[in-house]
Image (spheres, grey):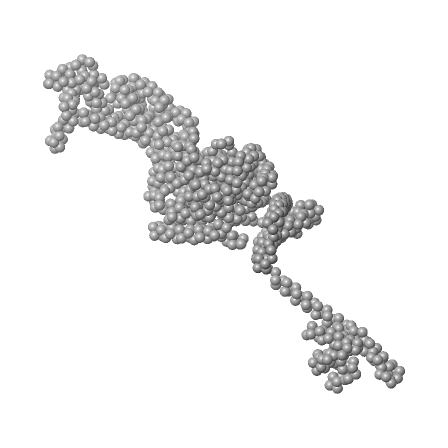
Amino acid sequence: MLRVGSNAACMACRNLVSTNMGVRFRVPLQKLHPLSRAIHHRYSGNTNPQRPPHRTAARSFTSMSRLPMRPPKPPPGSGGHGHQQQRNFWVARLAARLLRLRYILLGSAVGGGYTAKKTYDEWKDMLPDFSEYNWVIPDFVWELSEHIDLDKLAKALPEMEEIAKLLPDFDKIGENFTFLKSLLSFGVSLGSEVKGASGLHLLLETSGDPPLKATDSSAAATQDGSDKQYKKSSDREKIDQLQEELLRTQLKYQRMLERLEKENKELRKVVLQKDDKGIHQRKVKKSLIDLYSEVLDILSDYDANYNTQDHLPRVVVVGDQSAGKTSVLEMIAQARIFPRGSGEMMTRSPVKVTLSEGPHHVAMFKDSGREFDLSKEEDLAALRHEIELRMRKSVKQGQTVSCETISLSVKGPGIQRMVLVDLPGVISTVTAGMASDTKETIFSISKAYMQNPNAIILCIQDGSVDAERSIVTDLVSQMDPQGKRTIFVLTKVDLAEKNLASPNRIQQIVEGKLFPMKALGYFAVVTGKGSSGESIDSIKDYEEDFFQNSRLLRDGMLKAHQVTTKNLSLAVSDCFWKMVRESVEQQADVFKASRFNLETEWKNNYPRLRELDRNELFEKAKNEILDEVISLSQVTPQHWEAILQKKLWERVSTHVIENIYLPAAQTMDSGTFNTTVDIKLKQWTDKQLPHKALEIAWETLQEEFARFMAEYKGKDQDDIFDKLKEAVKDESIKRHKWNERAMDSLRVIQHNALEDRSITDKPQWDAAIQFMEETLQSRLKDTESVISDMVGPGWRQRWINWVNRTPDQHVRNETKNELDRLLKLHDEHTAYLANDEVTTVRKNLEGRGVEVDPVLIKDTWHQLYRRHFLQKALSHCNLCRRGFYYYQRHFVDSELECNDVVLFWRIQRMLVITANTLRQQLTNTEVRRLEKNVKEVLDDFGEDMEKKTHLITGRRVQLAEDLKKVREIQEKLEAFIEALHKEK
């Protein structure tokens, strides 16, 4: 309405001015705007009775107040009084209009503000919504904004004069583009002129005009040809100049971008290191690439079942040996991190490198907490040495390469985020020192990584050698025939340009026309002059200088985006993340299905058991074993002493009877008996007895330990731990060493016990007699068993069992009968036969037709006399039951001289004291040391994953392991996908 009113007011003013100037209007009055009609009636003297003059003036618009208010001329014949009234009326009307001016100004201000607000809202609606991109700026930047000194930051930025120096000459660029435009227009006009010339020729023929002379036309053609040749040469020169100018401009922009990126890195480093100026420390979140790398690490250890394969993207770096693939990877990582050698194989196992951005340039292994500062040469040397050691350690004996992956992460300012796997170089011939299957092993490793349909293949080709010698291109073309996930990189382009006679061959390579393989992109890079001591910065400078002065770019053989490792790393990173976004959710669904299959199998086969993986089962078995070891301390002293005493006597009884008692007792003299016994006991105690006692104690400890483990096995224990428990028991016993100082003290105790001959009371005497009687009866039974085997079965056994004696047994039986008659005649015979007695026995047997050897006679006599002596000793033992009274009063009676009873009492007392001593040492020292050994063995086994895998086996264990891995992979993938969506 305001706009319409304003236009009406302007028309009224024009009508008014035109009327005063005497211009006549032919427009009817009824067709005018109402406001115009009101003004017309007011100034023409005609008044509308329906609209008073003051209302007409009140509806006037702002533009009317700006018109010069001239009073109308008085009509002729009117006096001065009328003129005075007219002037007074004009002054009053002017004052009224001036008073209304404040309202007009107020209305204009309100209307202008409304219009400005409406325009601002329209522009605001046209702008896009940037709220979704708040993730680009981290949260701590908002916190840092309150603490950053903007004045210092402004001073650190380059001056406008410096930036202006870096900017190209836009005037020259404008001239060059104008020249290009003129060339294009020249081509168009030239075509139109040719068409026009042909039409003119036809017009001349039809009009009948005479044609031009031949000489004139040929001269004109020659002149035109020379002019065209001159124009072509000059145009070519201008095009060359334009290309050089564009190349220089691009290089200037590249330097400016690199400088700004460097300054940006420094600023970001300062921002990330601002932690000591009032900035609150926040919980560090894992980056997106770190989450993805963890998923790949878990998958590398996962034994895929149910056809679940690792199809997650990664950048696989393949190439011929010494093609420069490791150097390319180092340029991308911006550090010389890999071991290097002259012509020999250095990469002996796959190395997974996770690249990410961070404030410091550091590297770290997956299984180590040490950080290597890549800005320090000593840390770089240590990192290269550690990688070489890990590679050699992973290679098994007799092999050259290994398929075990070494996982390494590298962080630094400006590093592109991706995961690369450096593989051993492909070789064509196995040389001396290599395993015979090295070539096939490298091929199988490379194919295993490249057959992943989502793996990005970074194919490295040495540009300094003939392309026909390449092996890797054929291998890559087999794995990716369409080239949908291959990026081709030509290295050592500086040497290629120098050595190749035809640089067009490089152009054919990077255009994909020389090799049969296809690729997403082709790049040409330079990775230094070949010196191992070159730094990354010097290699970058050399690469930039080379491509700046190379005619490969000047002549258009290479595009600007196809050169330098920086452009390569950007392209690889973009391709990597594109592949990740396209495939990661599909892989998550695959592992979700695998998890369902595994959980279903567990529910069907082990419905009442918890899903314990190998580590959890080992911890459970560890607690059970430690409980069993602790149970050893609960064994009663009586049990220990009874077992030790019994086992000790079983071990030494043969020596005591055969080497001490029988030789002394067969002397038939009391003094000789005691002397012989004392001498032999002293010798036995000094040399053999302590060793035997400690061996018995150690064996008893082992047996008790095994017994407790066997008892626990029967108490609802899991049989899956049997191999582990047996291995722990054997290893603990092997490591356990008895305290050697105990042997000396034990020897003294045993010697003192055997020297004592004083039996203090009758119960001890009776106990000694019982011990002697039991021992002699046991030996007599053994002797009779030996004699029975020598002579064969008796008449009753032959009759009942229908068996006969062998010829040897028959001879033995006849010899036995003859020797029995000899013993009956000489009851007090010595232990040994005389030679004449042997001859007599042999002749008696020959008289009965039995041929016998003297050795057989002596052997048979030994067993018969032994039986005879033991029977007499038992009879004497019964007589000694009432001999304690005589022993106590030292009466000498040949029939009741019980020195043998005293000997057995000394042996028995020595056994009791030794068992007590060993029991104390077991319970106070050795059981604790064994428990300590068991703990050490369990700790060592817990750190050795191969040991646990070998000792804890079975489908149940493997199924629980797979379930744990699949769940972990799925959780990691879901966390990564969530973070990936947030980054989008």
Image point 64% across, 63% down: which residue?
A: 123
Task: Judge from the rendering whether residue 112 lies leftward or rightward of residue 466; answer left or right.
Answer: right
Image point 49% across, 35% down: which residue?
A: 465
Percent from the top left, x then y, of residue 228? 61, 47
In the rendered image, is residue 447 in sight? yes
Report the residue that reaches farthest toward the top: 836
Image point 70% across, 67% down: which residue?
A: 113
Percent from the top left, x then y, of residue 458? 49, 43
In the rendered image, is residue 270 in sight? no
Task: Judge from the rendering whether residue 202 lies leftward or rightward of residue 831; answer left or right.
Answer: right
Percent from the top left, x then y, of residue 680? 33, 20
Task: Judge from the rendering whether residue 312 lies leftward or rightward of residue 213; answer left or right.
Answer: left
Q: Nearer the viewer, residue 512 or 241?
A: 241
Image point 74% across, 79% down: which residue?
A: 25
Residue 850 placement: quadrant: top left
Percent from the top left, x then y, of residue 762? 31, 29
Q: Nearer the viewer, residue 426 or 298?
A: 426
Against 439, residue 682 (above or below) is above
Q: How many marks?
A: 0
